[in-house]
Image: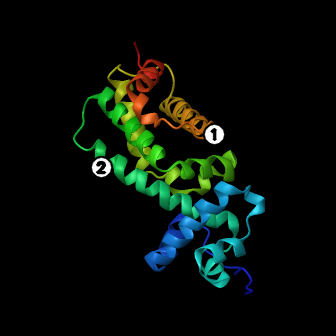
Amino acid sequence: MTASAPQDHPASHEARRAVLATMRPDTLHRIEQAVLKLFSQKDFHEVSLIDVARTAHVSLQTIYKYFGSKEVLVYAMLDVMLGRLAERMLDHLQGIDDVRERLRKTCWVTVDYMDKHPAVIQLFFTAVPVSRHNQIGIYESPELMGAFRGVLKDGQARGVLNNKVSSKVLLDVFMGIIGRVILMHIVRGEKRPLIEQFDDFFDIVWRAMSNA
């Protein structure tokens, strides 16, 4: 089973998504599960595209056709996985006007998702350098990040959230707290779902971000 990576593989997020849209759903699902399984068991450099192809029961040529490289494969799969979180989050924010409740809902959806899909957050933090986060389409999504920064800006404009820093800094505070807590919850092998501590956890997040 041999193949060579194509030289003209699509580089933009939009182009990658367009290419993935042509893949059979069951094939995409098998590749996604293979990526989660392999990269949660081994370091990034220890996993080869052949390993992914064999685990997903697809040809190596298929992997090259749709992804071209191991890095693009991981970025694309994270885009797919986090895209589901984005859709759910945007859906839950509909019709909520209260700043605290909108922030609480955003936090709850994220924690609940990661409790149910720990391998996704593990893959995100261990396989993707911080300098490459912008290679994951949904991470820079104007729909998701734009909507969430809109929540923060609105909260700042109302004087409810800390308005002494930019909305970008406030977003980093939110993502930093949640990301660290979820990652260490997984690393420590905690058995109790994080969502069971949600009310007390969110109280910490709220006190860190509110203008009180």
Q: What kind of element bears circle 1? A: helix
Q: Is residue 200 above or below residue 35?
A: above
Residue 36 image point, x, y percent: 59, 60
Residue 11 image point, x, y percent: 62, 68
Residue at the spot 61% in from the left edge and 56% down from the top edge: 135
Residue 149 image point, x, y percent: 43, 38
Q: Is residue 9 above or below residue 146?
A: below
Residue at the spot 66% in from the left edge and 79% down from the top edge: 8
* Disc number placed over residue 187 in the picture, else none: 1
Relative depth, front residue between 45 and 19: 45
- Residue, disc 2: 91
Mark 1–mark 2 distance (CA, rounded to whole Å): 30 Å
- The reply to whether the C-beta atoms of the residues labelled 1 and 2 are less than 8 Å apart is no
Residue at the spot 35% in from the left edge and 27% down from the top edge: 155
Specify the amino acid type for callout 2. Answer: Asp
Instruction: State which quarter of the image contains the N terminus.
Output: bottom right
Residue 162 image point, x, y percent: 44, 20
Judge the density around disc 1: few (<14), some (14-19), many (≥20) Cα neighbours within 10 Å.
few
Judge the density around disc 2: few (<14), some (14-19), many (≥20) Cα neighbours within 10 Å.
few
Q: Earlier in the sequence, mark 1 or mark 2?
A: 2
Q: What kind of element bears circle 2? A: helix
